[in-house]
């Protein structure tokens, strides 16, 4: 038998026997009153023995969550008096509570966390951060069932040491009151006489005190922060937004819609990284590269030959044309028509209420920082002496590099490595770890194979150690020296090298330092759950806020930042990261929402995996794209979706249905019962739900249904035949 269940059974048996033999009668208030004199006399005769027996009994009762703690505490006062009774009771109660805490943790925590880990994530994070504070508050109210606190805390991730010492301190006031009451046992008729309404109110106020104290301390800190800066008597505007990328634009849009007076400041290009250097140009390039790939595979579509003549410079010109086509959506003209004051210039925050731009000081009630992120240029010796690009500057290429080195195996590196390889560049991709490390192994394997099939030479577990220029008879040739995990070095020549090793938040140059606004370990601006910095009227959103660097999460955060900045004095909203999707636009695409298998395993969450292979999907077969899969993670035995990974054509589009389902609590049964157009790619979602349903078919019921149909045909079932043979 499982050790946990053995312990649970043993403890359960002890509790059952306790009630079966009516042992609780010995721990009743009447029994205590009746034996008061005897107990006092016994203690006088053998003080140490009685203290030991009392402590052992109290610890056992608290550990087993048996009723009688109130009477035992009164007995401590009645026998030992106040000065000895309080420490004996307090230590005994704390040890017993900790044993109950450990028992609940050992027996049930893993099962609870595995089953409800995603729902408990917020609670776990809160307890890891402020667990002692919450526990201390609960301990100050003796009217609250302490045994429930012990058991429930055992199911969380709060540290045992924190639980013990916080309980010891938190139970002191209540224990003192009950022990003191025990010294006056003769004048007490019932335990309820102790907890008068006035005393209960006093305990509640005592419990509120830490919260009031915390609020007061925070108010004092905030007041001290603002004391350095003179506050204007009136403000020119309601909101100033620094940065006109996705986060800043959505913030401005919402603020203008709410009829606030808002100023948007951008020092470079409207639309930010996504429009000018990221999503839009990369997808335009991928589209052209994909067409070339399709043309080369024309035979698979029954077309004997498709001759394609293209010019690399024209493809890059198309990328710029696409940017220009999308540009009006993010333009100064559009936002000016919406009522937003758009200012071109470099913003500098000079106080919590003032921003300087172009030599002019602007005053505002609130500020939203949405300055985005910029590419990381790795510190590789010799890199700056060669022709290197980032995801911001690669779009200036007009001549195709014959040999391109891509540093980085994340989404940007993989997308661009594949695209340039399809444009007939010799691409070498270098990654210190593995490609797309945040994805599951099965997804990474498919993408790695796809890149390899397109001609990308992939070097994982390899790092670039230096760049150098070698003079040859053909001229000066730049090359990068790489080192594998065994320490072996190799040189790779190139015409261009692309740095795609990540992006860092833009946090410098606009006044954060003067205001002492702290940064997180990830170098994002540190915020609370409402996207506020240490100054409650200064907010941040987008890449500079983290924890995600996606355009759609930037827009998602922008709603919270704008609404909280404008209406936070009356109602605030915590930013919701519960369902965040993302996609990597390689071919095939990789799209995911919620948990992956690796994450579930690392967090100790038990999941059931349902998989549908796209080689069975009719539309995928007709499109000559029948490869990839839909993988759904659910609670064991339940259809509740915990995470989805889709690898294949249109994976990013297929994921939307699962995002909707997870956001609104719809399970696989709901997806299965939804009519999907045939033949389309989204049918894969229904078939994945069907795979789950098939695995959970009610086998016993189906056996009886089979017998019913056999009976309806007038035949004997196999069971009847077997009985007849006997």
Image (tube, rainbow, N blue to C red):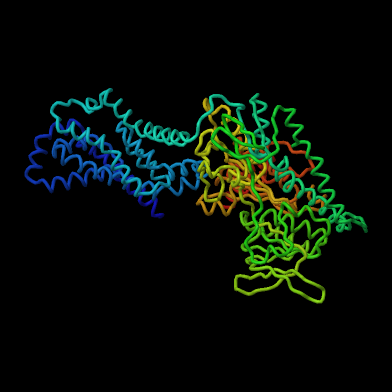
- Residue lying farthest front? 359
Q: Is residue 242 visible from the viewing direction of this image?
A: yes
Q: Quadrant of residue 327?
A: top right
Q: Residue at x 42, y 45 (%)?
A: 156
Looking at the picture, tell me which residue is in the foreground, 310 or 643.
Answer: 310
- Residue lying farthest bottom? 473
Residue 487 horizontal/vertical position (percent):
60, 73
Tell me if residue 696 comes above or below residue 195 in the rendering.
below
Residue 39 horizontal/vertical position (percent):
11, 38
Looking at the picture, tell me which residue is in the foreground, 224 or 606.
Answer: 224
Residue 318 horizontal/vertical position (percent):
84, 48
Q: Is residue 719 left or right of residue 218?
A: right
Q: Is residue 711 visible from the viewing direction of this image?
A: no
Looking at the picture, tell me which residue is in the foreground, 529 or 68.
Answer: 529
Q: Residue at x 70, y 65 (%)?
A: 385
Looking at the picture, tell me which residue is in the foreground, 710 or 159.
Answer: 159
Residue 116 horizontal/vertical position (percent):
50, 43
Q: Quadrant of residue 163?
A: top left
Q: Quadrant of the N terminus?
A: bottom left
């Amino acid at each position: 038998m499982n050790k946990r269940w053995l312990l649970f059974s043993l403890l359960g048996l002890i509790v059952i026997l306790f009630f079966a033999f009516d042992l609780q009668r010995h721990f009743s208030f009447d029994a205590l009153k009746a034996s008061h004199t005897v107990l006092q006399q016994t203690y006088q005769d053998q003080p140490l023995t009685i203290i030991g027996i009392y402590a052992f009994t109290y610890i056992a009762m608290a550990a087993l969550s048996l009723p009688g703690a109130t009477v035992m505490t009164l007995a401590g006062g009645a026998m030992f008096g106040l000065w000895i009774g309080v420490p004996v009771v307090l230590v005994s109660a704390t040890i017993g509570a900790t044993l109950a805490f450990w028992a609940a943790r050992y027996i049930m925590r893993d099962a609870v966390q595995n089953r409800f880990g995603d729902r408990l994530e917020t609670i776990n994070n809160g307890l890891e951060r402020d667990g002692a504070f919450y526990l201390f508050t609960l301990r100050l109210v003796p009217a609250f069932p302490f045994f429930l606190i012990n058991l429930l805390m055992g199911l969380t991730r709060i540290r045992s040491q924190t639980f013990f010492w916080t309980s010891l301190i938190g139970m002191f006031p209540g224990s003192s009151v009950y022990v003191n009451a025990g010294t006056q046992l003769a004048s007490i008729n019932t335990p309820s006489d102790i907890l008068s309404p006035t005393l209960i109110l006093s305990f509640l106020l005592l419990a509120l005190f830490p919260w009031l104290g915390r609020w007061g301390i925070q108010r004092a800190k905030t007041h001290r922060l603002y004391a350095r800066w003179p506050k204007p008597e009136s403000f020119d505007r309601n909101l100033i937004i620094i940065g006109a990328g996705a986060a800043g634009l959505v913030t401005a849009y919402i603020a203008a819609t709410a009829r606030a007076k808002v100023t948007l400041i951008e020092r470079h290009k409207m639309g930010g990284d996504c429009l000018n250097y990221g999503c839009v140009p990369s997808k335009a390039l991928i589209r052209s590269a994909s067409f070339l790939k399709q043309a080369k595979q024309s035979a698979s579509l029954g077309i004997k030959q498709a001759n394609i003549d293209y010019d690399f410079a024209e493809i890059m010109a198309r990328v710029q044309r696409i940017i220009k086509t999308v540009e009006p959506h993010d333009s100064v003209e559009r936002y000016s028509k919406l009522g937003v004051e758009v200012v071109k210039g470099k913003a500098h925050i000079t106080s919590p209420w003032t921003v300087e731009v172009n030599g002019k000081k602007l005053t505002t009630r609130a500020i939203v920082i949405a300055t985005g992120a910029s590419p990381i240029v790795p510190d590789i010796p010799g890199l700056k002496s060669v022709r290197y690009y980032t995801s911001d500057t690669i779009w200036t290429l007009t001549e195709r590099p014959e040999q391109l080195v891509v540093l980085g195996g994340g989404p940007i590196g993989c997308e661009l490595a594949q695209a340039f390889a399809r444009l007939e560049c010799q691409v070498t991709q270098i990654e210190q770890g593995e490609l797309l490390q945040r994805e599951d192994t099965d997804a990474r394997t498919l993408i790695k194979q796809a890149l390899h099939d397109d001609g990308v030479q992939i070097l994982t577990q390899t790092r670039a150690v230096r760049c150098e220029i070698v003079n040859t008879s053909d001229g000066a040739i730049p090359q990068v020296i790489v080192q594998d995990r065994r320490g072996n070095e190799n040189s790779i020549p190139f015409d261009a090298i692309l740095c795609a090793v990540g992006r860092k938040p833009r946090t410098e140059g606009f006044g954060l330092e003067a205001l002492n606004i702290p940064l997180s370990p990830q170098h994002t601006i540190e915020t609370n759950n409402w996207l506020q910095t240490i100054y409650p009227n200064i907010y941040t959103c987008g890449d500079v806020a983290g924890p995600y660097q996606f355009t759609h999460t930037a827009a998602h955060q922008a709603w919270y930042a704008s609404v909280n900045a404008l209406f936070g004095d009356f109602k605030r909203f915590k930013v919701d990261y519960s369902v965040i999707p993302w996609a990597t636009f390689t071919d095939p695409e990789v799209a995911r929402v919620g948990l992956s298998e690796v994450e579930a395993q690392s967090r100790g969450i038990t999941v059931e995996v349902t998989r549908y292979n796209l080689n069975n999907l009719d539309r995928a077969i007709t499109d000559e794209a029948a490869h990839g899969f839909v993988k759904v993670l659910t609670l064991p035995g339940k259809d509740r979706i915990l995470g989805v990974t889709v690898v294949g054509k249109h994976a990013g589009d297929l994921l939307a249905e699962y995002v909707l389902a997870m956001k609104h609590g719809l399970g696989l049964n709901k997806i299965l019962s939804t009519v999907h157009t045939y033949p389309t790619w989204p049918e894969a979602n229904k078939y994945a739900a069907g795979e789950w349903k098939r695995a959970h078919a009610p086998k016993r019921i189906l056996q009886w249904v089979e017998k019913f149909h056999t009976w309806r045909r007038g035949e004997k079932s196999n069971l009847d035949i077997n009985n007849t043979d006997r």
